[in-house]
Amino acid sequence: MIARVVLIVCAMLGLSCTPAGDRPHSPNTVLVFKHGKLSGNGAVLSDLLREFEKRYPGVVVREELLPSSSDRQHQYYAMNLDGGQAPFDLLGVDTIWAQEFAKAGWIAPLDTLLPPAEREQFFPGPIQAATFEGQLYAVPWYIDAGVLYYRRDLLERYGVAPPKTWPDLVHAAQRILDGERDAGLAGFVWQGRQYEGLICVALEVIRSNGSDLWDGDRDRAEAGLQFLRETVAGHRITPVSVGMADEESTRQVFGAGRALFMRNWPYAWSLLQREGSLVRGKVGMAPLPSFPGFASAPVLGGWLLAMPQGSAHPQEAGELIRFLTSPDAQRLVALEMGYNPTRRALYADETLVGARPLLKELYPIFLGARPRPVTPYYLMLSQAVQPEVSAVVVGRKTPHEALEAARRQVRRIIGNRELSIVTEGL
Amino acid sequence: MTEQPSTGTRQATRAVRLSERAWGYLLASPAFLLVGLVAVAPIAAALWLSLHRRLPVFGVEEFVGAWNYLQLWSDDRFWAACRTTLYFTVLSVATELLLGFGLALLLDGLTNGAGKSPRWAQVMIVVPWAIPTVVSAQIWAWLYQPDYGLLNYLLHRVNLITAPIDWLADPDWAIHAAVVMDVWKTAPFAALLLLAGLKTIPRDLYAAARVDGAGAWQQFRHITLPLLMPVVVIVLVFRTMDAVRVFDAVYVLTGGGPGNSTETLSIYAYKTLFQTLQFGYGSALATAMFLIVAALSSLYLLLLRRHLQEAT
């Protein structure tokens, strides 16, 4: 009885899938596009997908949204991609997952979809993040990088230029805070909660001191972390609440006019400048500062598009990836939804830059943005480092103790023999 | 067989008894099957998994015996999570029991005085218990917020603090903030169980005690407490099991931070299993947690049995 029901269900499932096999765009080809909920006007993306359907008659694209939380998306993909036969044909991949998914054999190589010559047209950071063992596994969809927001009005009032170095930022903040004598005003807010965002901030200060989390100069790495702690405890330009702060809570503090400087992603710009915002017209954006003698080191963020291994409609899914990452689609999404294109040429596009002049300032930042450690072990690494950096931020551990403990953790997880694989990409 | 004539009737009765027993098993088998499917099988599967090194991302799947458990033994983060969980459990369960007891006595007193059950009081007390944990944790996260949170505002108004305290970003406060939330949510549960227990105590026992000249404290000490002991143990078992496994309340409030100061065993297991996909090691963590819960529950039941034996 039960077996028969199962058989019938299988037959029904089979029927709905089989006709796509041999003919390229046969009717009934349903492409399931799984991705996290985007902010902004979702109708823009839907319209793009309808446009794709018009160009490829017989192909129907069904969007299936996941929660916007990156962790929960990762969990969903890990469950559904392991074991093959994923219930979708296209997926949005966080830049930090591409290596892991490729290593696991969960996503298919897309080398032929985007030939090496065409890859040059994209920013190098996301391409690096999407390349595993010499093969491309995902196509960059939109890009992000850490930037510094500042209160243009207050800096001008005190004749202070946007800081180029971290010591400059401290001096500027202290000077303005001394002058304003406003207990509700913070100097510098950033993401200090124990979560992925903290790793981005930590990498940015460590790399802007010419080091790295793993294989760089240890003293300079520790000095970078020490700076984060000092903003709270020594320089007193950062409130203690930074220990629980994420992107949105810092944006709200800065957006309420209660901070001079903020480290955040570019998405905050349009929210800070929208009508009714308390800081509208008073905000500036600059590359993140660095330590003297070193370069600014924004961390790369953003999403890629990939295809599960063993997709039933690889050709159609590939076409859709190409369509969504085409200059026209990227221009539209950038104009209407505020997501930043991964194709470099669009930053010289007159319509786009005319409507969003900020892109000009973002171009060099995106060009220099470096991915977080490019390794399939990234999530383990991040999970091991998060509590340690957080302990430094709240003053529980010295940077030296924290980095030592993080190294011990990682060594325990993967065993000494394999540590070289981890350090490779760092 | 050799004594066939004399054992004939006995055999017959045994046959009946056996078939009775068989019937019993037969009738109970759906229950056994259900428990086996939903409880025993997953536990067995987790145990089996914990003896493997299984990292699907790296195609690693090998039997490693007790390796994961040896790793646990030398894993600082595991012991830290144990300490955090234990601290959270002892503090929250003790407070819940005391507070629940107080509430139960209060409600019982109200009932007796007014002659009928005050519904409003019972409803009010159940409200925190009825709200989903994730929702109440989010509410408490707002209450704890340093700048516009209600808690700092109130403390400031009554001049208890001068500067706002960041309850969740301070590693010393954070775990206590989670305890307070948990107590708020589950003390009503303890109160309800204890109230039900109080209702079962015959009133004439108190009348008799009063005749003998026992004061309120003596009545409580020699009647209420001993007769309520089984209920107290039930409350302790339920609450301890929940507290050792605490996940959502703490995860929503702090995510385990700052500096891992609120990372409980469940949170560590979740991160290991579902975020970094170390299925073998994560299962070992889950098994360790299962053993801790089982050990604590057995301890309580042992204490209860001894108490009952002493009573009789």
Image (cartoon, rainbow, N blue to C red):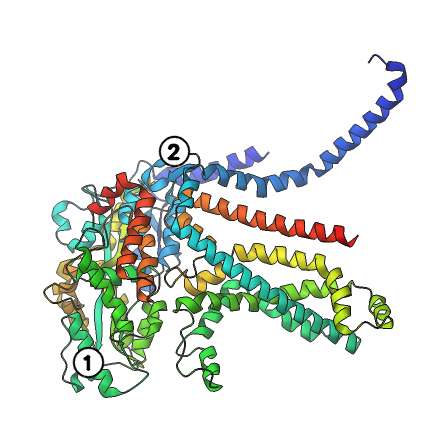
| SS assignment at label 2 | strand
Q: Vertical placement of A6 versus A367: above or below?
A: above
Query: Marks 1 and 2, how far apart in space?
Result: 59 Å
The answer to whether residue A14 is seen in the rendering is yes
Q: Mark 2 points at which residue?
A: B62
- Residue at x 25%, y 87% (from the top left corner): A180
Closer-to-camera residue (B85/B311): B311
Closer-to-camera residue (A328/A374): A374
Q: Where is residue B245 in the image (x, y as percent from the top left)?
A: 52, 54
Closer-to-camera residue (A369/B268): B268
Q: Is mark 1 in CB contact (under 8 Å) with mark 2?
A: no
Q: Mark 1 points at which residue?
A: A152
Task: Tell me the amino acid under the disc marked 2.
Answer: Glu
Q: Residue A295: which quarter of the image?
A: bottom left
- Residue at x 53%, y 38% (from the top left corner): B44
The chain holding disc 1 is A
The chain holding disc 2 is B
Q: Position of residue A104 (x, y in %)?
A: 31, 41
Q: Residue B39: which quarter of the image?
A: top right
Closer-to-camera residue (A216/A314): A216
Q: Nearer the viewer, mark 1 or mark 2?
A: 2
Q: Is residue B191 left or right of residue A189?
A: right
Q: Vertical placement of A133 versus B221: above or below?
A: above
Q: How crowded is mark 2: few (under 14 residues within 10 Å), some or many (20 or more)?
A: few
The answer to whether residue A84 is seen in the rendering is no
Q: Where is residue A99 in the image (x, y as percent from the top left)?
A: 26, 46
Residue A187 - label: none
Q: Residue B262: which quarter of the image?
A: bottom left
Task: Tell me the amino acid under the disc marked 1.
Answer: Arg
Q: Where is residue B300 in the image (x, y as percent from the top left)?
A: 64, 52
Q: In this view, does B176 lie to the left or right of B303?
A: left
